Image: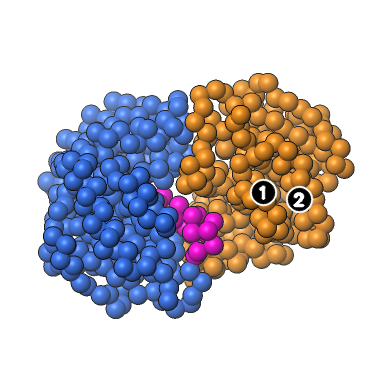
Chain colours: A blue, B orange
C-alpha cells in the first residue's frame, strides 16, 4: 500500500504546494486537508493555530503518511516545532525552503517578504534568512487582505489589482531584487503581484521550493514512490465544499486529471 | 569545534559547488579535495573511480566532517552508493539535485544532459530523471573535451568556443528547454555554452542545486552551523598546486575573502 504525502493548509493556499508536488513528483499520492471553515489563520493567536494544526495532523495520521507538509506559512511559523515533536515521520514547513531560494537568487542582498499578520509578526522569515546568511537585509510587509480574495476565488479583478497596488506599491523604494511570497495563497495572485512589483523583482513561491525539498528529503531517506500506477489523490476540507471544489478544479484542472477524487468532509469543526 | 562540510572532486570542478556553498551557507566551514593529479575521471573505469573516491573519503574523514559531498558527476554515478554504505554521515552527490531542478523548470518535458563519457555511459541522469518523472524525454551527450579545457584554466578562448560549438551545435534540433550541466567543471564554461545553445535553453548548474540541497539536508538534521565566526576553509589537491591555486583564486577570489587558506598536499598519489 503506497504511503501518501499529507499536506495541510488553512484553506486553498496549500493547493499551490499540492500542484507542484503533483508536477515534480507525479508518482506520489497526496492526502490534502484545507481548513476552509476556519480560514484565515493569519489574524489568529499562535496558541489557537497550534491547536488547529494538531487537530488536522491527528486527522491525517489515519492515512499512514510518510511525511507531513505544513503548507501554510502561518501554521509553519506557529506550529512546525510542535508537530515535529509529536510525530515520528518527517515534518516540513514552507518557510525555510522559500528562504533558501531567496538566498540563492538575490544579487543585491535585499529580500522582501510578504505574508499574513501572523507570519510577519512571528519574524520567522527574518530568522530563517539571517540564520542562513547574516548579511541579508529583509523588508517585511503583512498583507492581510490577500487571503480573503483568494479564498473567494477572486484572482484577477480590478479590486484585486487595487488591493495589491495599495499593499505593495511602497516596496518599490527599496533595492530588493527578490520577493518571497510568504503565504501559499499568494501564488494565485502572481500575475497581479508581478505587474505591481515590476520585472526587476523575482517572485519566489514557497510552493515550488517546498515541493523540491519534499523530493530531496524523501530521496535522501530512500522513500520516494517507485510504483508505476497513477496515484489517486484525496482532498478534504472543513468548510463549504462547493467553492473548494471550484477552486481546486480551476487550479489543478488544467494540467492534471484528478480521477477519481474522493471528496469527504470530516466533522472536526 | 565546528564540523566542516567535506567536498571532493576529480579536480577543480567541485570548486563550483564550494563557491555556491560559501555563498548560500556563509557560516559553514569547507574542507575541499581536488584530485588534480588523476583528473579527468571521465574516461576511467567505474572500479578505478570507486577506488579513488574511497581513498579521498578516507583522507577527508580525519577532519570529522558532518557531511560528504561528492561534487563530481562521474564519481557520483560510480561511487555514491558505495560511499554511503561505508560512512555514517550523510553523503550527497550532484546528480539528483540537478535532475530535480530540471524537472521543476522544464515546460516542454525535453531535458538535455551533457557530461563526461563516464557519466553519460552510466545513464545516471536518465535514471534519476525518469525515476522522478517517467514522462520526461532525455537527450544526452558526452563532452570529453570540456574538462581538460577547464583544468587548464581555458574558459573563454576561441578554442573553447569552437570545442563547445562542435560538441553541442547539433542539440539545437531538439525541443529541449533545459540543459543540465552534468559535470561540475562545466559552469566554468557557462557563458560559452549559453552562446551556443541560445536564450531558449535554461542551463542548470548541478553546483547551485547541490548547495541548496546541502542546506536543506543539514537544516532537516538540525546540523547547520550556528556560529558567528568567519569559517576558515581548507583546500587540498593531489597534483600541481600552482595551477590549482591560480584557478581557485580566479574562481573564488572575486566574491570571497579566503583568509587564511591552508594549502597542503597529501601524499595519496
Query: Residue A95 at x, y = what percent?
Result: 36, 43
Query: Residue A231 at x, y = what percent?
Result: 39, 74
| In front of the other: B90 or B230 | B90
Tag 1 residue: B70
The magenta region covers A204-224
Residue located farthest toward the top when viewing the structure as drawn: B259
Q: Is residue A6 above or below residue B194?
A: below
- Same chain for the residues under marks 2 and 1 in the image: yes
For this view, does A92 lie left or right of residue B27?
left
Which residue corresponds to the image point at 82% horizontal and 38% vertical from the top-left? B238
Instruction: Pinpoint the chain carrying mark 2.
Output: B
Assign the magenta stretch its main secondary structure: helix
SS label for mark 2: helix
Tag 2 residue: B53
| In front of the other: B131 or B171 | B131
Q: Is residue A220 magenta?
A: yes
Query: Residue B206 at x, y = what percent?
Result: 59, 49
Residue A13 visible to an observer of this rendering? no
Residue A68 visible to an observer of this rendering? yes
SS label for mark 1: strand
Query: Residue A128 at x, y = what percent?
Result: 39, 36
Residue B260 in which image quadrant: top right
For the image, the number of numbered tags is: 2
For this view, does B33 lie left or right of residue A22?
right
> Which tag, 2 or 1, sits closer to the chain's start?
2
Q: Quadrant of the C terminus of chain A?
A: bottom left
What is the crowding at mark 2: few (fewer than 14 residues within 10 Å), some, or many (at least 20)? many
Which residue corresponds to the image point at 73% horizontal and 38% vertical from the top-left? B62
Badges 2 and 1: C-beta atoms under 8 Å apart? Answer: yes
What is the crowding at mark 1: few (fewer than 14 residues within 10 Å), some, or many (at least 20)? many
Amino acid at each position: 500500500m503506497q504511503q501518501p504525502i499529507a499536506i495541510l493548509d488553512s484553506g486553498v493556499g496549500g493547493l499551490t504546494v499540492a500542484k507542484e508536488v503533483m508536477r515534480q513528483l507525479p508518482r506520489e499520492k497526496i492526502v490534502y486537508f484545507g481548513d476552509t471553515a476556519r480560514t484565515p489563520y493569519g489574524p489568529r493567536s499562535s496558541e489557537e493555530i497550534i491547536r488547529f494544526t494538531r487537530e488536522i495532523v491527528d486527522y491525517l495520521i489515519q492515512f499512514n503518511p510518510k511525511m507531513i507538509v505544513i503548507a501554510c506559512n502561518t501554521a509553519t511559523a506557529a506550529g512546525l516545532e510542535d508537530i515535529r515533536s509529536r510525530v515520528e515521520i518527517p515534518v516540513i514547513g514552507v518557510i525555510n525552503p522559500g528562504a533558501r531560494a531567496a538566498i540563492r537568487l538575490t544579487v543585491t542582498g535585499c529580500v522582501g517578504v510578504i505574508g499574513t499578520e501572523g507570519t510577519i509578526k512571528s519574524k520567522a522569515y527574518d530568522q530563517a534568512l539571517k540564520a542562513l546568511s547574516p548579511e541579508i537585509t529583509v523588508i517585511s510587509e503583512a498583507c492581510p487582505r490577500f487571503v480573503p480574495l483568494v479564498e473567494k476565488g477572486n484572482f484577477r479583478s480590478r479590486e484585486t489589482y487595487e488591493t495589491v497596488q495599495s499593499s505593495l506599491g511602497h516596496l518599490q523604494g527599496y533595492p530588493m531584487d527578490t520577493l518571497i511570497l510568504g503565504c501559499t495563497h499568494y501564488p494565485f495572485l502572481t500575475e497581479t503581484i508581478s505587474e505591481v512589483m515590476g520585472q526587476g523583482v523575482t517572485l519566489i513561491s514557497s510552493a515550488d521550493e517546498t515541493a523540491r525539498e519534499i523530493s530531496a528529503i524523501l530521496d535522501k531517506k530512500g522513500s520516494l514512490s517507485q510504483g508505476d500506477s497513477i496515484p489517486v489523490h484525496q482532498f478534504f476540507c472543513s468548510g463549504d465544499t462547493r467553492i473548494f471544489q471550484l477552486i481546486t478544479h480551476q487550479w489543478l484542472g488544467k494540467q492534471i486529471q484528478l480521477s477519481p477524487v474522493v471528496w469527504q468532509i470530516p466533522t472536526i469543526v
